[in-house]
Amino acid sequence: MRRHAYVLAADPHFLTASIRSYYDRVDRIVVSYDATSTSWTGTPLPVEQCLAAIRALDVDGRCVLAPGSFADLDRDPLTNDTRQRQVALDQASEGADWVVQLDTDEVLARPETFFAALDHTEEAAADGLDYPARWLYTRAGADRFLESSTRFGRPVASFPGPLAVRAGTTLTLSRQADVPLYRVDLRPWNTDPHHPRTAVVHEVVPLEAAVLHYSWVRPPEIMRRKFAWSGHAAEYTRRGVYERWESFSRRPRLAALTSPLRSDDWFRVGRVPDAATDVP
């Protein structure tokens, strides 16, 4: 089974840790980026910093640079997001059976478990691997993070879309695809509040094997830039998301302690696997 991957070179903050977590398990990595270093919302991106990091880690020459024009300001940012991913996926599909689509702030804590699940996806004749991620919010200590949870502190998974799809798949929105999925979760039933309770779970993995999604683990100045270039920038501004993140980041343990008192934004302080603690 020939496996390729694609990455969007826009955010350098966890890029090296992310690519290294699967680098030796794929044959080729398509590096997609806007040739003008412009985001989907028209803001500048640190593309050259990303490319420099990729050149430094690409010791076996697996990475293929694929510049393009993806900042069409006449389109909705999420439309630009989906278009860039589709172009990258099509490029990565050439000569591949499967394409891994991890964002550069997502790290495989246990690559062997992830790729075993991909083998099971192939055996099940499914077309996409829905694999659980831990949504990390901010640091709460040397190896502790504020992360999404149930109201009373049980871990939950997030599924932004299948993290691997068959070559040639058509995306519907960002990484999402309307294809038969092999679904992996943290318990024998659905743990994602954004999925129905009846969602089928085909395989269970331990919390330590979940993808570590360092989604909002950034210094404040970087977080502001990330919100500005995100496909969800307008929503973040409207809902005061940055201000809430800043408040919780100042006192992450208090945010976890008071979680049951809120109607949403439930958190716990969790420990990340030792193998994934060498990130910024």
Image (tube, rainbow, N blue to C red):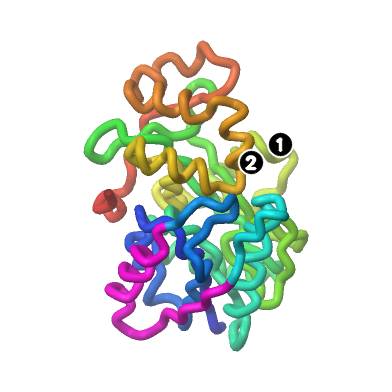
So how many labels did they put on this image?
A: 2
Asked where in the image residue 173 lies, by quadrant, the reply is bottom right
Amino acid, disc 1: Arg
Can residue 201 be seen in the rendering of this structure? yes
The secondary element bearing badge 2 is classed as: loop
- The image shows residue 168 at horizontal and vertical percentages of 70, 77
Please report the residue visible at 43 percent of the width from the left and 34 percent of the height from the top: 147
Residue 197 badge: 1
Give the answer, above or below, for where 135 lies relative to 251. below
- Callout 2: few (<14), some (14-19), or many (20+) C-alpha neighbours within 10 Å? some
Left or right: 42 as drawn, with respect to 209: right
Question: In 3D space, how far apart are the residues under numbered discs 2 and 1 (Cα atoms)?
Answer: 7 Å
Label number found at residue 115: none
Residue at the image point whose x is 44% and y is 28% from the top:
245
Q: Residue at x 52, y 75 (%)?
A: 67
Question: Which mark is first along the chain, 1 or 2?
Answer: 2
